[in-house]
Image (tube, helix red, strand yellow):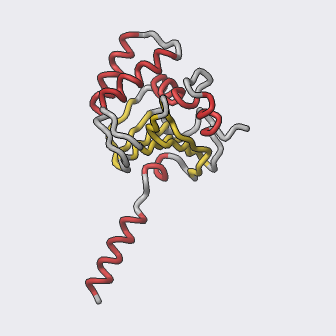
Amino acid sequence: MRRVLFTLLMVLGTVLQASPLQDQVPHAKQVGHGRLSVMMIELYDITLYAPHGQFQKDQPFALELHYLKTIAGGRIVSQTIKEIKRQGFSDQKKLDEWEERLSHIFVDVKKGIFLMGVFTKNKDTLFYRNGKEIGGISDPLFGQLFFNIWLGEKTRDPYLRKKLLNLQ
């Protein structure tokens, strides 16, 4: 009986541990969600979380990506930098710095992996893989440009943006 009770308490303790979402985004609720597909290939499902389900770009929020396909980490990094450039950002020194940092954060992802990017109250960007922190970048400009890949008006996929922001 003690062994069963001990096991139950261990499981319950694990379930009750605060997630990165709960830690970083107070009162987090889903704002919207969608799926990114490129040329009929489904890459990931993506969900936006914000306090009380109300997104404000200057308040903490999180994007969680659930990968539906295996993708090389290098591909994730290069596509991220490409999308930041596409927004009109051209400071090559900053881009190189961010690319170097991201190359240590994003490793290959397999189908079923969850990655989360969190824009914190301090304007840092933290990254998590299946709930464990894998790195971050303490530059508010990076956070703005990174999350604008999905949430900004210059996004490559305005339909997905509308779904994430729950716009009619």
Q: Is residue 82 above or below residue 119?
A: above
Left/right placement of residue 30 relative to residue 95 reads right
Residue at coordinates 30% horizontally, 77% vertically from top-left? Answer: 7
At which x and y percent is residue 101? 31, 26
Comparing 82 with 122, the one in front is: 82
Q: Tag count in the figure? A: 0
Q: In this view, does 39 lie above or below 43?
A: above
Residue furthest to the bottom in view is 1
At which x and y percent is residue 47? 53, 44
Residue at coordinates 41% horizontally, 25% vertically from top-left? Answer: 80
Residue at coordinates 47% horizontally, 39% vertically from top-left? Answer: 118
Comparing 159 with 21, the one in front is: 159
Comparing 125 with 32, the one in front is: 32
Q: Is residue 157 above or below residue 119?
A: above
At which x and y percent is residue 126? 41, 38
Residue at coordinates 52% horizontally, 47% vertically from top-left? Answer: 25
Which quadrant would the C terminus be assigned to in this image?
A: top right
Residue furthest to the right in view is 168
Left/right placement of residue 71 relative to residue 55 reads left
Left/right placement of residue 89 relative to residue 92 reads right
Which quadrant would the N terminus be assigned to in this image?
A: bottom left
Q: In this view, does 15 lie above or below 8?
A: above
Location of residue 166 (image quadrant):
top right
